[in-house]
Amino acid sequence: MADGLSVPTARFFIDENEKIATGSSKDKLNVVSVHMPRSENDLDIELVKKVVEEHGITQPILVDNEHKITDVFENQYVPAYYVFDAEGKLRHFQAGGSGMKMLEKRVNRVLEENEKTQQ
C-alpha cells in the first residue's frame, strides 16, 4: 500500500475510527487508537505520523511497538475495538472489520446508559 501499513484494509478502519471519534457524541466519548505493529515497517514512527496526518486523525494514538497493551488484552486482531463505560468496565469487544454498525450501536448504548446515570 502507498501508506506503508501492513494491514491491507487499514485505510478503511482508520477512516471508520475517525468517524466514531468525531461523531455526534464526540464530547461524551473518548477514543484512543492503539497502533499495533505487524511488520518492520509498522515500527517506523515517522511513517505512523505520516499516515495520521494524511488521514486527518484527531484522536490520540498510542504506538505499542513493544506490544505491552496488545499483550495485556491478549489481542491478536487488527482491527480490534474495546468499548468501556464511564467506570472503566469493558462492555464490548469486537475483532475484525465487519460489524461497524454493531460497534456503533454498542457505543451508543453505553453512552445512553451513562447519560441516564448522570441525571
Image (cartoon, rainbow, N blue to C red):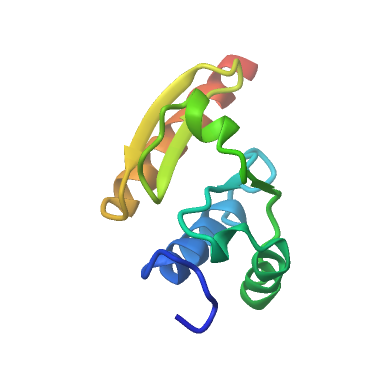
**Among all residues in the image, which is located at the extreme front?**
40
Q: Position of residue 50 (x, y in %)?
A: 69, 73
Measured as percent of width and height from the top left, residue 86 is found at: 60, 22
Which residue is located at x 57 percent, y 32 percent?
Answer: 69
Q: Is residue 119 visible?
A: no
**Vertical relation: 24 (above or below) 10:** above
**Image point (48%, 59%), residue name:** 39
Left or right: residue 91 versus residue 35 is: left
> 13 left or right of 50?
left
On screen, 47 above or below 35?
below
2 relative to 49 in the view: left or right: left
In the picture shown, does residue 67 fall above or below 118? below
Q: How many marks?
A: 0
The residue positioned 39% from the left and 50% from the top of the image is 78
Asked whether, in this view, residue 4 is left or right of residue 54, the answer is left
Q: Position of residue 18 (x, y in %)?
A: 57, 60
Pick whichever, 38 or 101, lies toward us.
38
Q: Position of residue 59 (x, y in %)?
A: 68, 53
Residue nearest the viewer, comparing 66 with 21: 66
> What is the quadrant of residue 41 in the picture?
bottom right
**Residue 44 location, quadrant:** bottom right
Image quarter of the N terminus: bottom left
Image quarter where the C terminus lies is: top right
Q: Depth check: give the residue in front, 52 or 22.
A: 52
